[in-house]
Image (cartoon, rainbow, N blue to C red):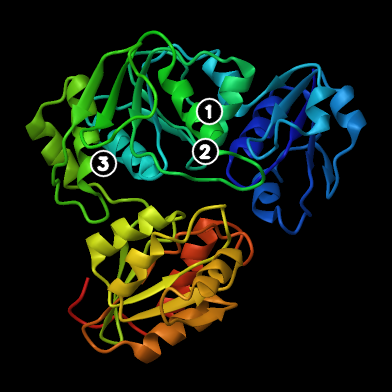
Amino acid sequence: MKVTILGLGLHGGGTGAARFFASRGDDVLVTDLRTPEALAPSLKALEDLEGITYVLGTNRMRDITEAELVIKNSAVRWDNPLLAAAHRIETDISWNLNRITRPLICITGTKGKTTTAYLVHHLLSRKFPLCELAGNMGISLFSLHKTDGPDPLVLELSSWQLRDLRMLGTAIPHRASLLTSLYPDHLENGYTLAQYLKDKEYLFAQDGGWSVIPDNLSLPFSVDRMPVYHAEEIDLGIPGVLGETAGQALLTARHFGMTSQEVLEAAKSFRAPDHRLQPLGVYRGISWFNDSAATIPEAVLRALEAIQPDHLITGGTDKGLSVELFREVIPRCTTVHLLSGSFSKKLMESCIHPFFGPFETMEQAVESALTHARPGDRVLLSPGAASFEGFLNAEDRGYQFINAVKSLGQRDPGHE
């Protein structure tokens, strides 16, 4: 079969699809508008495979029309004329959902979905050793070890991935559906709040299954097609895990037969994923925290409530979101240090608070925060914006922050 991967990307779905179809002997072509240099990590992950054709830096119509199957990257917009010429379109999610019969736990939300997915998987792995994790965190469904059996699959779904499933009409079977939070997001390039909510709603608009939502979350759409369980905030004592995340994970684990005591015991060994309220330690007498995954203003507010920093590094690329919440966020800090970008420009034009920067590099922003911090202070990176004008993605931004902090010298003795 002739298969075209439209959008290799850097988050695992494209590489997983290319490896799957090439390994079974299909004629695979990978095309992406980005250059080989920009796609280097994904290309390296495929370098052991022979027979894949690469068309990078451009997209050709014939690579779509001549393919029997197009695997669409979620970043490819549905108004792209290439898609109208395709004979058959699937995504890494839709292709595999058609084959999966094991219990499925789908997790979506504006913020908190990755941490919730990792925590649910960590807890259930104690009872189900073959429980697997996949989805938006960069683990392709093509890497699944099994598509059937009693062990659950925990699947993180972004709004873009849900949009693809909705446009393709793909059913989401055998599922528990978790919604972690709901705020305006991704309101750039003509994507509206109504469309964003419609994509999130798709997970809850099908018959069967059951859902878990935070007790304090008001929904703008109906979930009456399935039983709804409301999770209260609890404290599992895990750094980087907020109360609503812990509550949803606990309730989900109990639905799969775990006792509260089993959950509490399993939680002791959980480490939250990087870039989410991540404590880096004490350097130069100052505590540093990495919250690079905070890409909306509401996430910055939650980070400030959790960390209570003295100094904030924030800003970046505009996602079409309002700066109004920063009128509440920024005055909570002694100093504010802006990363360069279109959203930072909006903050500057609003004159919300005195700031330093904007800084073109993470090293400059860290050095600025260090200059104004005193021993015992806390410095938090929580951008409240996208990253693409200065970094590959939010993870790259976070790792650059980690490296910049570590370059300040050895971690102070006696501190974790």
> 39 or 243: nearer the eye?
243
Between discs 1 and 2, the one toward the N terminus: 1
Provide residue 263's location: percent of width, then percent of height: 15, 35
Residue 94 lies, with reference to residue 4, above or below; the image says above
The residues bearing labels 1 and 2 have C-alpha atoms spaced at a distance of: 15 Å
Provide residue 344's location: percent of width, then percent of height: 54, 69
> 65 or 14: nearer the eye?
65
Give neighbour class at mark 3: few <14, some 14-19, many 20+ (Cα, 10 Å): many
Residue 182 lies, with reference to residue 298, above or below; the image says above
Q: In the shown orientation, is residue 223 left or right of residue 27? A: left
Disc 2 target residue: 193
Q: Secondary structure at mark 1?
A: helix
Q: Secondary structure at mark 2?
A: helix
Q: Name the mark on residue 162.
A: 1
> 370 or 316: nearer the eye?
316
Figure quadrant of residue 180:
top left
